[in-house]
Every structure is written in C-alpha cells, then in structure tokens.
Amino acid sequence: MDETPLLSVRDLTVAFDTRRGSFDAIRGVSFDLRPGRTLGVVGESGSGKSVTAMAMMRLLPEAARVTAGQVRFAGRDLRTITERQMRSVRGREIAMVFQDPMASLNPIFTIGHQVMEPLVLQLGLAGSAARARATELLSLVRIPSPAQTMRAYPHELSGGMRQRVMIAIALSCGPKLLIADEPTTALDVTTQAQILELLSDLQHTLHMSVLLITHDLGVVATFADDVLVMYAGRIVERSPVAALFEQPGHPYTEGLLRSMPPLEDDDPEVLPAIEGNVASPFTMPSGCAFHPRCRYAWDACTRILPSLMSVGERHDAACLRHASVTA
Amino acid sequence: MTALVRADNLVKHYPVVSGAFRKRVTGSVRAVDGVSFTIARGETLALVGESGCGKSTTGRLLMRLVEPTAGTVRFDNLEISELDSKQLRAARRRMQLVFQDPGSAFNPRMTVASLIAEPMRLAGLSAAARRARVLELLPLVGLAAEHAARYPHEFSGGQRQRIGIARALALQPDFVVCDEPVSALDVSVQAQVINLLTNLQRVFGLTYLFISHDLRVVRHVADRVAVMYLGRIVEIADKVTLYRTPQHPYTRALLSAVPAHRPGAVRSRTEVVGEIASARAVPPGCRYHTRCPAVMPVCRTDDPALVDLGDGHRSACHLVHAVH
C-alpha cells in the first residue's frame, strides 16, 4: 500500500477574535491521512475538530484566521495556492458532507438540478450526459428510485435520503478525500448505520480517503482505521483504532471509553464518569487543559503542557505520565 | 408490585388541515395509536424508538400536557383524564418533566435560584420556604450555593441540566418523565448526569419514564424497556430479556444498528432497510412490514396484537406468534 500521506497537516493553529478577546480554537494540530484510509476525529463541542477541517479547506468564518502551520494535500500547500486553485481543489479533489443536509441543499431546486450542477460546472458535462451521470450517482448511494428522486425537491425527502443526496453530490467529481463532519448525528440509529455502511462501502470501491469527524466513539470503533482525539483545541492522542481502544494513552480517552455504558458486558451500578466540565477557551486551565478533570493529575500537570509522546507503534499521547516512563 | 402509572389504550391523532382558503381536515397524523403500559412505584420504564415514533407525545399524554384523543391515564388513585383544572394542577405537582435541552426552556433573565423556585412560587410556597428549599436542592444536584445568584448562560450544558433536574425535584414529585435528558450533552458529561438521575431515584424512591433513542443509556438506567414504532409499542420486556432475547424484528434491527463498543467486534450488517414510514400514512397490517426482512403475506393485511410470551415479555409480531 502507498504510505505517502495524501494529506499532511503540521502545527496548524487557528485564532478567533471575539468581543471577549482573542483565543486559539486549535493549537499545533499535526496529523497525516494516508490514501484509502479513514481517519476518525473525536472530540466534544468546542474541541476544535470542525475548525481543523474548515481551516484546511480555507473556509473559516471571518472572525478566525490561521496563525501558523502547513496543510499539504497531494503535493500542494493548500495555504499558499491561489483562491482560484483552492476552489478547484474544493470542487474536484476534496468534498465535504455536513451534519444537516437541509442546510446545504437549496429548497427551490430539484434534487436532479443540484446533483447535476457540479457535473456541469466542474466536469463540463453537457445536459443529457450530466443527467445520466446524476441518476447513476443517486443509485450509487442506494436511493431506491433514482429517476423519480431526480424530480423531487429536498423537502419531499427524509433526512436519511437527503444525506444520501449530499453524498452523491460530494462524490460527483471523484474526490480523493471526503470530509464527513458529523454526517449521521442528526439521523436515527437505523438510518445512521445504513449511511455509515454506505460511506464505508463507497470508500473501498472508490479508494477515497475519509476524514470522519464525530463525537461518537462507537462510530469511530466501527468505521475508522486511525483516530485523533481532540480536547480543548489540541490533539491529545493519535493512534490506530485498535490500539486506542485496547490501550488508551491519554486519561481523557480512557475516561471517555470507561464512561460509555456497555451494550453486552456487565453493566456497572455507577458509571465511571469524567468529573467536571469541558474547558472554556476563555478560562483555559494552565499546563495540560485536562488536568482539572484528570484522575491521574499531579502538580507538574498544572504547569507543563505535554506534547505528543510515543506510547506504541504510530500511537502518541500528550500526557506527562508517559514522559516519566521514558525519561 | 403496585402500579403508580397506568396508561390504557392511549391515542393521540393530530388532524392534517389542507387548503389555502377553505381549510379542510384531509387526514390525521397518528402520533400515538393505542399504547398501554404500567410503571410500578420506584421503577424506570424506558421508552425507546426513533424520531416520530410517538415516545415524547406518550410522555406528555401521561402528564396531560397533551390532551389524548382516546384512552386513560391512571396516576396513583387519580384518573388523570377526569380531573378538572384545579385538581390537575395539584396532581402535576407530583409529576414532573426533565427536558432534553433545559437551556432553551429557561428564561435567560432569571437567576438559577428563581428558576428552581418558580414551580414552588406557582404552587404558593412562601419566599422563605422557597429559599430554604433551593439551598437544599443545589447540593443534591451537584451545584454550589454560590451558583444560586448566577444566570443560566454562565453554565455549561451539563450544569444547566442539573438546574433543570433541581427544578423538577423542587415540589418533591413521585414521578418524573425524563425526555432525552442527556442527548444534548457532551459525551464526557452524559455519564455524570445519568449517575445523578439514578442516585436521586434511589434516594427519593422516584419513578421514571425514561424516553431515549440511545440503547446504551437505556440498558444502564431502565428496569423495563418498551420499544415504540409508529405510535405503537411493538415489544416490551424487562431489560435483561429485551437485550438478550429480543423477539420483534424491529428491536433486533435497533440493537444491530448500535455502533460497536470496540473495533473488530463481530458486527453483522444492519438488519434493517429503509426508513420509518410516515405517521400520516400508517401502512396497513403490521406497521413495520415495509421494512421487515422476515415479512410474510399475513403481515401486509393483519395488524399483530401485543401477545404475552411469558414473564411480562410481550411482542407484536406474526412471526413470533407463529413460533410460540
């Protein structure tokens, strides 16, 4: 397998300016995504997982700016190419799917119109060829009656069907990378499972890379090859999926795994919860941002910000406990 | 085992009105369509199902926050549907609701103390009694006394849910309807709130109706579980039986759709196709037949009854009935 990363992010830092002052939404984010693999990005609201994706795509809101870092994609530096080149990357090479398909679909145009649009604009297909290809894409995402759906309007479809349409649009130009930001969070469990299975099948047949952003560790366990765990704007752990679940290297990851109620195993009377609340960007704790909630924290954790340290093969965690072992 | 809550054949249909000028009733949404169950004192019954299955409406019907189209609710010795408005207000002091997102239900200009005290004020308690009770409630839900003077926007989602729980407990209810109480919370905070709810139940002997779409959470908190599909209960059993030997194809589909706990776990492909049908056009026969992998001719014509399979395990499926 080709091990050259398709996407390589180094030390990415994004600052937000707000009325209450400026803060870093993400700091020093570094990771690689290899061709044909799925990288799961797990974290809670405000952890910076969506900001990371938006910064890569140069789609940050006005109040935000990238203050440091590189984003290399298929041999180019996405931070320095022109806006025109970037538009072509966004249209043809990197596609995105979001949580709420209704917000991305235009209510006044038919599904057919919206699936055909990128085929015409980006690939230059003519009317009938675009129509044929659009119908094909709808059946690729397993929409039961594609020809009929081409004539439908977004409001006539269920949430699951709309998300399939969004995936069809995302795939229309044969992207190398698909960024899926909480693609199933708004959907029911049975629909979620169908959409995730669809994404995973498509990824294998089309040999795409997928960046799967989610708050759900179960989704990561089932569908990701590698995982980034983010907390308070930083990557706190980076690992192949099996190692993350077997031997979590960061206390936050460990806490998340322990607090998840089991579906088959013995159920503890009291769930081992992580105490405290998610750190706010304005009252970011000193040292390791997780230390006020950490059951292993000691005085050094309040002063020293740990960097990612190796705890296994391709497995890194940002926790001082590992420094004391190796030092 | 005495039932604190008994729902008998609850029905809620909403009329569908069409026409731009002359409004006409052209159909109905069968949100809840014949639901019966009991909840014993001190027990947690979980109501699970996907959006639109009628689980939240069922919770509101129990408290008569929504008027039923048909059916009755018995709470302790009261026939809820027969109470006049004064009696109903008195009964509602004993039944409270915890919402998914308490933040959106709070008046942002009220302090935490006045938010928690509001139900007591409406019930006519004195200012001194209210203040004393608020100070009693704050530590019970894991908040500090100094939080009393602050405003809801100063709190995180988990803390806001603690305020919502304190408010629900203010009048010492017997019965609490928890409607997706942790769904809007960050994963690392969900377990804290679940532990709080189970602990309060133990301390005060509360009875819960726990409405959720999350089968992991339900397995942890429930004693018994009822699975709803398109306005009906399709299976109900004690927790262990339901998770170990689910009988209804829909229950099995729901369980198979939960993402695994760890990678590499043997995972069969999801046993479900399509999506929930519309409550405006409920399929004839068994409501689930349009998605069921084991559909038989009888399923398209006959509506299966909820049949007892022993030990209070009931399922509404022709296939299961044929075997038993």
Image (spheres, coloured by chain):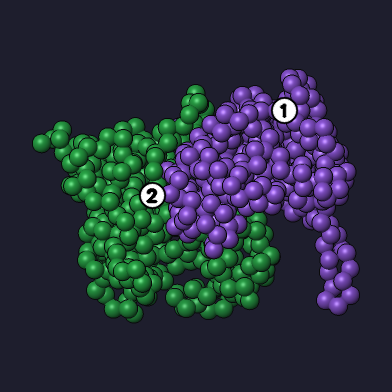
**Residue A209 visible in the snapshot:** no
Q: Nearer the viewer, residue A105 or B114?
A: B114
Q: Which residue occupies 47% across, 55% down?
A: B149
- Dot 1 amino acid type: Ala
Left or right: where B188 falls relative to B90: left
Q: Residue at x 78, y 36 (%)?
A: B75
Q: Chain of mark 1?
A: B
Query: Which corner quadrant holds the C terminus of chain A?
Result: top left
With B231 as the anchor, is A241 left or right in this view?
left
Task: Give the color of chain A as drawn.
Answer: green
Label ID, residue A278: 2
Secondary structure at badge 1 equals strand
Q: Colour in which chain B is shown?
A: purple
> Disc 2 and disc 1: Cα gap in Å?
37 Å
Q: Amino acid at mark 2?
A: Val
Residue that mark 1 sits on: B40
Left of A303 or right of it: where is B22? right
